[in-house]
Amino acid sequence: MFQRNRMLEMLENKQLPLGIQMFTADAALIEVVGATGFDFVMLDSEHSGANPRNIEDLVRACIVAGVAAYVRVPDPHNATDIRRALEAGAEGIFLPEIRSIDDINAAAEAAFFPPKGDRGICPSVRAANFNFRSFNRYADWNNREINLVPMIENPQGVELIDQICSHPDVHVVIFGQGDLAFSLGEGTQMGAGRQAAEAYRKILASAKKHDVAVMGGPVLTPNAEGCRKALEDGVRVFCLGLDSMAFRSWCEATVRALADGIEGQSEWRRPAVPESGFPATN
């Protein structure tokens, strides 16, 4: 209990943290993630059906798997969701749709105990080891180690990125290329559109100026070339893949492997292969 924040410690030691987004709320997959060398998972409660009770069990799975648990809450202004994620034992919170420093201030009020924030105490929670005697130690650890991670997913957040990166509790920011591109009218091009690419450069420059790490990388189709390019751009925390989409990718490749393998080799045939759910790569 009460160890250093793994992501922040790795950054201090010039190591590149690697994480994955988890939507399925499956403890077995978390164990696989830990066994294969990931450092953290993002447990999603914005777009999935996760609830406070199973988030707590998933954090336990993260402990068993040896990976740090982060929770993406639905709303940075919902103090209850932030508090419950931290009480479950998360090392940090992903904050979606950050538009200004006011959004981060609201999240910080919910995440930190007085005098840093306004979070109410309760020793009877997992993160405090269900322990009244050591609660002061837990509160000190929480206020020192909890990592608030703003997600820059809209034009206003890009416009105010200097203000966001200057916040004392911001050590990592996420370039939310999918939402940002869509909000800029560039559809599902992710970071390939002109406006999203310009926003990416602006976020990287501001983060470098304020000594803030940028989280990113080739999220949908991780490969060595994409990771190398992201590192050269200035990405220092990699969050690659989504569990459900990764399984879809494997399923697509498996269906295609059988179709290609039997082509011209047998009187037996397969139904037509469905269209891929991923962008075409040239």
Image (cartoon, rainbow, N blue to C red):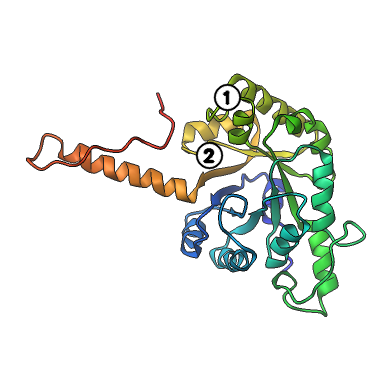
Identity of the residue drawn at 46% across and 36% down: 223
Percent of width and height locating residue 65? 54, 64
Q: Nearer the viewer, residue 218 or 188?
A: 188
Q: CA distance from mark 2 to mark 1?
A: 18 Å
Would you say residue 208 is visible in this rendering?
A: no
Residue 230 percent across, percent down from the top left: 58, 32
What residue is disc 2 on? 219
Q: Residue 68, percent across and down?
A: 62, 58
Please tell me whether residue 208 is drawn above or below residue 35 in the rendered image: above
What is the secondary structure assignment of the residue under circle 1?
A: loop
Amino acid at dot 2? Val
Instruction: Tell which residue pokes out farthest to the top in this image.
Output: 194
The single residue placed furthest to the left in the displayed view is 267
Q: Residues within 10 Å of mark 2 (few under 14, many from 20)?
A: some
2 or 1: tag closer to the N-terminus = 1
Residue at the spot 45% in from the left edge and 45% down from the top edge: 245
* Residue 186: numbered disc: 1
Say above or below: 184 vs 30: above
> Does residue 204 appear in this view?
yes
Closer to us: 41 or 274: 274
Image quarter in which the N terminus is found: bottom right
Q: Is residue 72 left or right of residue 226?
A: right
Give the number of the disc on residue 50: none
Q: Residues within 10 Å of mark 1 (few under 14, many from 20)?
A: some
Secondary structure at numbered mark 2? loop
Tell us which disc is closer to us: 2 or 1: 1
Residue under the point 63% across and 67% down: 56
Q: Amino acid at mark 1?
A: Glu
Instruction: Please count the marks in the image.
Output: 2
Residue 269 lies in quadrant = top left
